[in-house]
Image: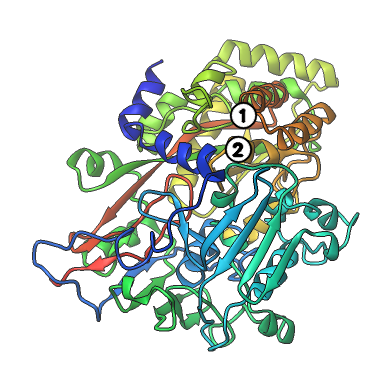
Amino acid sequence: MKRQKAWKVLSTAALLAVLAVTGCSQSAAPPQQGAQGGSTPGQATQDAGGQADMTAKLRLNLKTEPPSLDPPKGFDSTSNEVLNATMEGLVRLDKDHKPQPAMAEKWTVSEDGKTYTFTLRDSKWSNGDPVTAQDFEFAFKRILDPNNAFPSAFLAYYIDGGEAFNKGEGTADGVKVKALDDKTFEVHLNAPAAYFLHIITQPTFFPVNKKVVESNPKWAENASSLVTNGPFKMEDWVHDQSVKVVKNDGYWDKDSVKFAGIDWVMVNDENTQYQMYKTSQLDMVQTVPIDMKKELIDSGEAKVEPEASIYYYRMNTTMPPFTNVNVRKAFALAIDRKTLIENVVQGKQPAALAHVPLGFPEPEGGDFREKGGDFFKDNDVEQAKELLKKGMEEEGWTTLPPVTLTFNTSDTHKAIAQVLQEMYKKNLGVDVKLENKEWNVFLADQRARKLQFSRSTIPADYGDPVNYLELFVTDHPGNRINYSNKDYDALVEKIRNTANETERFKLMHDAEKIFMDDMPLVPIYFGTKVYMDQSNIKGIIRHPVGTIDYKWVEIGKK
């Protein structure tokens, strides 16, 4: 299919290779100690001018205030960007996107693949305290504490006793993580998970200083009280304005950090951001103005890389008219994605006609998405009209209940929403109201399931298709649209407990089919990253699956 070939041009099989490594091979012996030591894994090529400027700071745009810098609470791309710079977990993704030793200098895996035993290296918190296995035990159990209601708790359900504790059916003592001594941390899983090391690179699993957290419930709200253990430490945080971090000389791998720190501003206007970049006020931008995107990509000034992600709209299944499956299908089929991508989004994205993105390799080879295929046709307007008519008749509606499409502040999100509004009017005769919300408000309302029809970008948290499937289990915190199907729930549970990879992948295809038959979302496109770096900036690591990493950046002297 043309759209699949277009993706391959972008990825050149790199994403498949990445996910193959972070998927099936991770139960093998760990990388040798020192694989991430020194500057090798993320070492940047210096600019033609020669030496890196050790006194320079990287100037970036965060766009908006991070919702939280408490690792399991700040479960969003904005928070994770800062967290990945200031904190570190047991393992860290290197420049080849593979988990490598970080706070853990080595680990062993039991023969049955269920028990991981990590040996911690000597490292310190930014306040001088040692980072201990007790901090990790406290942090992992804290993720799952139902009283905290952390949105990322589901990622820890792979831990034996984790889901029961989080759902109020078990206790903290029943969560099978344990500090055997100050330097030895043991984790026991429900079932073998070949991608477990990739999962724990996610900021959710970063340690927290037990003493600090217990003594100050507001420890993560200001720079002065934040205690971190990563490459950088907090210097200043002016809420809704800026975040500043400096090199952490107490970091175990400080010699790999070749610059002084990072200054983030919060400018949520793409044209202003672009002008700041062009006038050298910013060293990198992660998005470009939509009216210039094609020109910048074609000229080579903006770069495009693959990303295992999907851009879609959620339909709240308990809010009319999306209580009806045929109405939901009508909204999915009535969109001309090709026109939207080519004329508005302009990032060489493949059209999404399914839920799980491209980039997840099958055990016997090939791609999960390619094997699973498409679940509907793009721009199938006549079928969409029939489905809308059928759905309205089933509900006894002569007029469709009002529809409000909600998006968070962004020129791109706004442009996409406006085009969808026009398409729904033209193709279905439906008037859709548009509603804009600032990021923190939008995210809180969506998580509270208050939004009827709202946009999402979901990047993979780890390299396996089940990451996408588990989000829509009944009452899952990632669900956000009240979707519920008992057969689907049972199948996802079976997937989690199936060790045979061939059988597990077959079950995942079956689960996706159930989900797409129910159509609780409108897939738009599978993601790419469009960005620009200044010529003297080298070594920013953009993982197809994982948080952007600045640890190995080198800033050349101008």
Residue 39 occupies quadrant: bottom left
Describe residue 417's horizontal placement relative to residue 187 as left or right: left
Describe residue 487's horizontal placement relative to residue 478 as left or right: right
The residue identified by callout 1 is 501
Q: How many marks?
A: 2
Q: Is residue 514 above or below residue 160?
A: above
Position in image of residue 59 (x %, y %): 32, 70
Identify the secondary structure beneath mark 2. Answer: strand
Position in image of residue 81 (x %, y %): 47, 62
Residue 34 numbered tag? none
Q: Is residue 445 above or below residue 316?
A: below
Identify the secondary structure beneath mark 1. Answer: helix
Describe residue 529's horizontal placement relative to residue 420 as left or right: left
Which amino acid type corresponds to the residue marked 1 in the rendered image? Glu
Residue 85 occupies quadrant: bottom left
Residue 27 occupies quadrant: top right
Position in image of residue 333 (x %, y %): 59, 20
Point 74% across, 82% down: residue: 214
Work out whether residue 112 or residue 129 is closer to the camera in this orientation and state it: 112
Q: Are marks 2 and 1 in contact (CB under 8 Å)?
A: no
Which quarter of the rendered picture does the N terminus lie within? top left
Instruction: Give the residue furthest to the right.
Output: 169
Q: Is residue 85 above or below residue 127?
A: above
Work out whether residue 86 or residue 116 is closer to the camera in this orientation and state it: 116
Which quarter of the rendered picture does the C terminus lie within? bottom left
Q: Residues within 10 Å of mark 2 (few under 14, many from 20)?
A: many
Instruction: Give the residue furthest to the left.
Output: 49
Work out whether residue 154 or residue 341 is closer to the camera in this orientation and state it: 154
Marks 2 and 1 sit apart, C-alpha to C-alpha, by: 31 Å
Q: Earlier in the sequence, mark 2 or mark 1?
A: 2
The residue identified by callout 2 is 313
Point 85% across, 52% down: residue: 164
